[in-house]
Image (tube, rainbow, N blue to C red):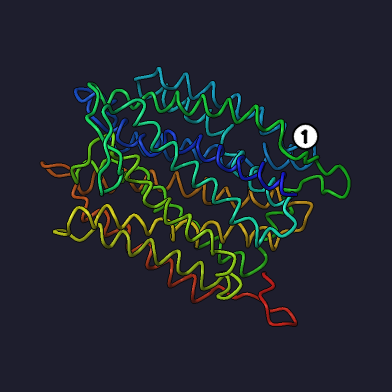
Amino acid sequence: MRSATSRLSLMMFLQYAVWGAWLPLAGRYLSASTAEGGLGFTGGEIGLILGLAGSIGAVASPFIAGQLADRRFSTERFLAFLLAVGGFIKWVTALQTEYQPWLLLSIAYSVVYMPTLALSNSMAFANLPNPAAQFPRVRVWGTIGWIVVSWVFPMIYLQTDLRLQAMPPFLVGPELSGVTSRLADSLRFSAIISWGYAIFCLFLPHTPPRREGVEPLAVAKAFRLLRQPAFAVLVAASLPISIIHQIYFIQTPPFLSYLGLLDSQIGPAMTIGQFSEIAIMAVLGLMLTRLGFRTVITIGALAYFIRYAIWSTTGLPVELMVGSQALHGICYACFFAAAYIYTDKVASPDVRHSAQTVFGILILGGGPVLGGILSGVLQDRYMTAAGVDFASLWRVVSLIGLGTAIFFFAFFRERKSADGSPAGG
């Protein structure tokens, strides 16, 4: 089992390295003017590329991952196929400079990549004897993967003569010429990682499909989890949180540029949130045992509110603005990682793949497309002659987080087992 756990940890490392290689830099590259070396897309266009595209993939995910992985193909081989195709699409995307090809290729990529998020989760849950206790320790390697690629890429492609400094990203150096245009190489970097991950998938624990005892439409049974009041409340709260989570990835890169960070510093600076996520994920199992899902998930929602409230306050030191990204680890671990664990807890074994992807429809489907739209609307609404009024934009986003935290804490209730421990649903 130690060998299996190690392989699952490396799987998570690669799963999020593929994503982290390009996503933190996409907002800056797409929004920067062509004179700077970016693509000069509008806020609405960026919202569709980073929102609608991902949503289409998430909506298709239950039928791609759920039906095929649950019932027809082994999870590890299906993962390998999706990642190999995704790497090819991402490489081709790096060559594009026009909006329509970017949008279409982004949609195609999301259709093959989004199912891998749910499949990697279900692969871990299927091969860990005690998922509630062990999953956070395995999943934390995904965070480490995100951090590593966020640092390695600028050090290889964007900077020279690196030196140490006290402030994140700690290792910095003069930027190479045409640094903004070089951000396109992050897509090629992601493609290379994706191909390596595809090969590694063939060495993961064999996880065969369930040909017996599985309903013909596992997705339909997974959707019936919504009949459980607690799960329905979790789903209802996840939608607005996923909206403001998406806005983070769209607006934070240009926001950090607005604060004065160099393009080569944006990715590493955003990993402050991942460092704190490691710490929270390490104790998430204990938090869930001691505090329960209701309190932990509420803490996650409140962390979104506090972070965006800080960003909406003008006159604060840049160091505080950048450092407050440490709250991102609490946001993700306490809300989304806990929600994934709760979903696995309440789903029956034959539809756990599908239950994860059904939940993914909301946080990776409905949330991103609405987040992309709202991001574009807020950017246009608060655009001034001097640029985006980020204080007003983040104020609106923070209030969404506060309202969601209040709603979830007020209405989510866990059933208790005979010994008084949480029993879900």
Residue 112: percent from the left, percent from the top? Answer: 59, 31
Residue drawn 58% across the image and 42% down it: 59
Q: Which residue occupies the foreground of this view, 127 or 371?
A: 127
Provide the secondary structure element on which disc 1 rests.
loop
CA neighbours of label 1 inside 10 A, class few (<14), some (14 to 19), many (20+)? some
Residue 231: percent from the left, percent from the top? Answer: 62, 65
Q: Which residue is mark 1?
A: 73
Position of 60 relative to 90 (above/below): below
Residue extending furthest toward the left:
385
Residue 54: percent from the left, percent from the top? Answer: 49, 38
Residue extending furthest toward the bottom:
419
- Identify the image quadrant of the C terminus: bottom right
Q: Is residue 45 left or right of residue 195?
A: left
Q: Is residue 121 left or right of residue 308?
A: right
Residue 270: percent from the left, percent from the top? Answer: 35, 46
Residue extending furthest toward the right:
212
Q: Which residue occupies the foreground of this view, 337 or 268?
A: 268
Q: How many marks?
A: 1
Position of 107 relative to 247 (above/below): above
Position of 234 relative to 382 (above/below): below
Q: Which residue occupies the foreground of this view, 87 or 55?
A: 87
Residue drawn 35% across the image and 20% down it: 98
Amino acid identity at mark 1? Phe
Position of 150 relative to 233 (above/below): above
